[in-house]
Amino acid sequence: MQAISLSAGTLPFAAPAGWIPLSPEYDPWDPIRSAAAYGRHELTSVELTVTHLCNMRCEHCAVGDSLTTKEAPHLPLDLLFARLDEVERLETISMTGGEPTFSMDTVRDILVPVLKYARKRGVRTQLNSNVTMDYERYEMIAPYLDVMHISFNYTKAEDFHEVGFARTGRNVSSGMIAKMYERMIENARRLADGGLFVSAESMINYRTHGKIADIHRLIREMGCVRHEVHPMYPSSFASGLPAITRGQMAEAVETLLDVRDPDMWMLFGTLPFFACSEDESERRLVRRLREETNVTVRNDPDGRNRVNVNLFSGDVYVTDFASVPPFGNIRGEKLDDVFAKWRDHPMQMAVNCHCPSAGCCGPNLLVSEMYYKGIDFKARKAIV
Ligand code: SF4
């Protein structure tokens, strides 16, 4: 594969000199790496829910039902750092919301200290943001951040309006939204120009599957290093939206592979296609994804090598959006111990398959629930 990296140290937001560049060959979020290194799934990744506030209300928001307009104080950071210190094999930290930069207090009191902690420890970080706030907020964060992960499902400001404000419950003026759309694109561009690894994620859903090629082109023009693509799954707000067929989804993936910029890293995740499929055309697609240059299919970290910690309650979840109840709390338990409980959980055991020949460690809970109800993946094997 061709190496995709940013020149370390030459730009203000580039990774520190000497750090292995993130690339299709080095993706520390992929649980297949830790599963191969340790012989079983281990906790190497922690995701923090740092806010439930957001300036948008996207129609597909996977955590939409938990968004609020006011929130309680965070747990003390000393407690969080003590718990992170105990995670022996920690490689990555992600921060998510809501919109993590919505409040300046969160930027100053949570994001920056956590990112500095991670840098000191050599841990990679990702921030999930809509990058629609003032650039100054991102400028405070970018020097310590590894991946700025943005959502991008649009071809024009009108799409942004329809998708991003569908659940606001009030009219938002088109002029104001057009300005926000421009600011989002401008912020992404400035951060990318400063050497930050900007990764834009698109969903394949009823709105985007027919225009995914145009979305890809705009993402490339913004200077993003990576385009991440996932199907939409019916969680929270998204559960009321129309579904597309697996065939339409496969077609959108094929289109992207046909038209993509071959120099840009394309990361696919949570796809419902596996090397053990009885359907020859799905196996052919899986093979194509494996063989293309600068294309990766990331196994889902949620519940494999990662847990989600709610920074208000301390509750530990398998993901930030699953309906699975919390299975621990950092106020009284070590994260490695909480993770060990999850590893033995019947829900995790049911999808805990692993085919090294296909670089695959099975579907996540949403994929298995939606497409493979009642299927025992541990009885299947990759057909290579
Ligand atoms: S790891 Fe599981 S899902 Fe992947 S190819 Fe093997 S049996 Fe199928």
Image (cartoon, rainbow, N blue to C red):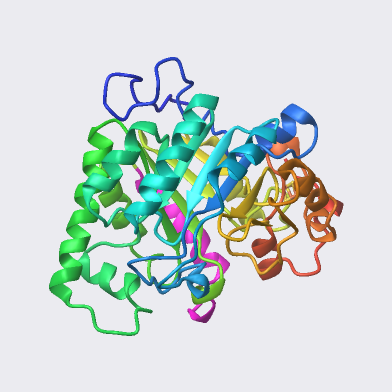
> Which secondary structure type mostly characterizes the magenta part of the structure?
helix
Tally the marks: 0
Q: Residue 266 lies in what quarter of the image?
A: top left
In the picture as drawn, the residue positioned furthest to the left comes out as 175
- Tell me which residue sits at (55%, 26%) in the image: 121
Can residue 242 be seen in this snapshot? yes
Nearer-the-camera pick, 98 or 329: 329
Measuring from the top left, give residue 302's x and y in whole percent: 64, 51
In the picture as drawn, the residue positioned furthest to the bottom comes out as 170
Judge whether 312 appears above or below 68 on screen.
Answer: above
- Tell me which residue sits at (30%, 62%) in the image: 154
Measuring from the top left, give residue 58's x and y in whole percent: 39, 70
In the image: residue 122, left or right of residue 315: left
Q: Is residue 258 magenta?
A: yes
In the picture as drawn, the residue positioned furthest to the top comes out as 18
Nearer-the-camera pick, 214 or 143: 143
Nearer-the-camera pick, 11 or 98: 98
Q: Residue 365 lies in what quarter of the image?
A: bottom right
Q: Is residue 255 magenta?
A: yes
In the image: residue 213, left or right of residue 146: left
Q: Which residues are magenta?
A: 239-260
Measuring from the top left, give residue 190's x and y in whole percent: 21, 40
In the image: residue 40, left or right of residue 130: right
- Tell me which residue sits at (45%, 72%) in the image: 68
Judge whether 175 appears above or below 297 on screen.
Answer: below
Judge whether 332 appears above or below 139 on screen.
Answer: below
- Tell me which residue sits at (33%, 19%) in the image: 9
Measuring from the top left, give residue 231's x and y in whole percent: 51, 61
Can residue 221 be seen in this snapshot? no
Quadrant holding the C terminus: top right
Q: Residue 363 lies in what quarter of the image?
A: bottom right
